[in-house]
Image (spheres, rainbow, N blue to C red):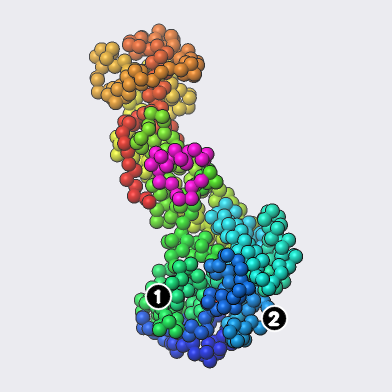
Amino acid sequence: MSQELQDLLEWAKNGKIFVDPGIKFQITSDRGVICVAKEDIKNGKDLIKVPKDLALTPTLAASFFGDDWTSSHDRNQQLQLFLARLKFNDEDTFVDGVNISKKMAPYINFLPSNGRDTGLPYFWTEEEKYLLSGTDAEVFLKRFMDEIVEEWHSAVTGLKSVTMPNDMESFYQNYKKGNYNKGMAYFLEQKMTWTSFQAYLWAHCILASRAFPFVLFDPSNKLHKAFLVPVIDLLNHKNATPVRWYTSDQQQMVFSSLEDPSNMKKGLELFNNYGDKPNYAILLGYGFVIPDNKFDITTLSLKVPENYIEAAKKFGVKLPDDASAEGINFVLTKKYPLPENLIDFFAFLVRLTSENNIYTTRMLIEGIANLRAILGTKVNAFKKFKMTTDRRVAPSVARMVKVYRNLQKAIFLEAQQATIILEKNMLKKYHALSFKRILTRDKVFFNSLLLTFGVSNYNDLVAKKILDQAVLLWIVRNANKNDYKDLDPLLFPEFIYEEFQNVKKNVAITEQDVLEFRSIYKSLFPALSQMIPEVYNVGDWTPRNFIVAGTVSDRLTFKRPTNNEVFFLKKEEAKTGFGGK
Ligand SMILES: C[S@@+](CC[C@H](N)C(=O)[O-])C[C@H]1O[C@@H](n2cnc3c(N)ncnc32)[C@H](O)[C@@H]1O
């Protein structure tokens, strides 16, 4: 046991902190101090009780600063700066005549002596932070660091009795200019004075990783302030551990574990529960990650022009609240890797003007295929990322990031797999008609392709790049169905015929359409009608019908990107029925 831990426990005993004789604390090489059962522990038993007097609270910090504090910010800022002072100022800190520096010395000494030792990524080397590239943790680390810099600056410049040192002001100005985007680590390694940014960041990390909600003592505290409770903060976290924290008579804070007794047997570690958090939050708040964390999430960020966001909302897509031109952040959870609003958004992105107020089967299925491609690029980026080794990368950090990245990749992979299943289910549910199937049924048409293009199977159509023409030809044939004699009318689905008539009647043909279809048409006609008149010289095969067929194909077909299989889908309202929220 380290001297600091020994001193802390001795101080705790003298200060009337109750520690159940059935538990003990010991130091591990990889997870710091842990709490271990010395005997079988009954669940629900009060294990640690800490008098309020030994807690470091926002009230105490506020009393210390008093009128000296003028910053409008105050969530945990006062307590953080107060803690930084207790740790990094050699002068004693008095509150209402009590020397808090002296009173709390064993606790303050026990806390990590520098930023690096907190283990939180804010103090990682640049090479270590680089390992987070492309992850949510990288984004949040930058965002939170920006916030902490602002908080600190406003707190320290707001203190009447303190003049911001020049080097600190110049750090602030340079940080704002982006000059510390790389190279922060070196700055953070420098010596700390209590008002320095380094000290404030250290205090932020201490509160993030060890504090409890002050609402336990002060139910009126709406700001979610935090406070520090010695000894109870020695327990490590395990997901889903049932624990109880409560205050008795507003005088002491009590910890008890409601864990299954089989997990509290002699020799086993006893845990606290820091909450159901995803790994990026555990990493940034506590400096570790949980392998196979069932609360893990990842973010798929998409950037689209602002007018798309408005239009999507108007269409009924439930976008995340923070959606803006800066980006839309869809949260993929381990439990629901494919959120329904993400599918809706991708469906919206491929909607045609003719699809104006419903999600059609085509929109959803095509949207899902596009979404799969994006998820694929995320998975590949994770797969390709090289975990470089460097002497400035601690092996423990590299191991942790590897676990984190693997879990992130797994969520994207699960989402990608889910799109495959969803596409399959939807094609089945909405009775998609495969063009491959059409070709096996419509033998006369298929033979015409064989004779003219030398196509002997579906894959040949793809290989010879004439699949799209074949689909158009068949749509026109379908429109001419009443002109063919002796053909089974069941070969020609009514919904495709009707859409053709609808488009022909209602959609104006533009010059652009004519130009687009001219070369395709010329490559096929009049040759086809001369070679196989029984198919291509019956009914109306004019260029106009080709153009109409093009629109029908846009509206009713979906080409599966994985194997180029074309499906016809009835235009109807569809639901994924996937249940992912
Ligand atoms: C409230 S303290 C718990 C006591 C801590 N082990 C100590 O040495 O003081 C929180 C810190 O403990 C460590 N920790 C807690 N739970 C952990 C876990 N499940 N795995 C690894 N480290 C953990 C992390 O370093 C975290 O920042």
Find residue 226 and name its label. Answer: none
For the residues carrying marks 1 and 2, which lies nearer the camera in this image? 2
- Locate residue 530, reporting x and y percent: 40, 7
Q: Is residue 60 left or right of residue 21?
A: right
Residue placed under numbered mark 2 in the picture? 90
The magenta stretch is: 304-324
At mark 2, the secondary structure is loop
Q: Does the magenta stretch include residue 307?
A: yes
- Image quadrant for the N terminus? bottom right
Residue 519 position (above or below residue 215):
above
Is residue 352 depicted above or below 405 in this figure?
above
- Say whether residue 524 is magenta: no
In the displayed structure, would residue 544 be above or below residue 98? above
| 487 left or right, relative to 176 | left
In this image, 175 relative to 356: left or right?
Answer: right
Residue nearest the viewer, comparing 184 with 426: 184
Residue situated in front as seen by the camera: 549 or 418: 549
Q: Distance between the residues labelled 1 and 2?
A: 38 Å
Q: Residue at x 64, y 67 (%)?
A: 158
**In the image, farthest residue toward the front:** 67
Identify the residue at image location x=25%, y=23%.
490
Report helix, strand or loop for mark 1: strand
- At label 2, the amino acid type is Asp
- The front one of 201 and 580 is 201
Relative image position of residue 114 (x, y in whole percent): 65, 73
Q: Position of residue 272 (x, y in %)?
A: 45, 74
Which of pointers 1 and 2 lies earlier in the amino acid sequence? 2
Q: Is mark 2 within 8 Å of ligand 1?
A: no
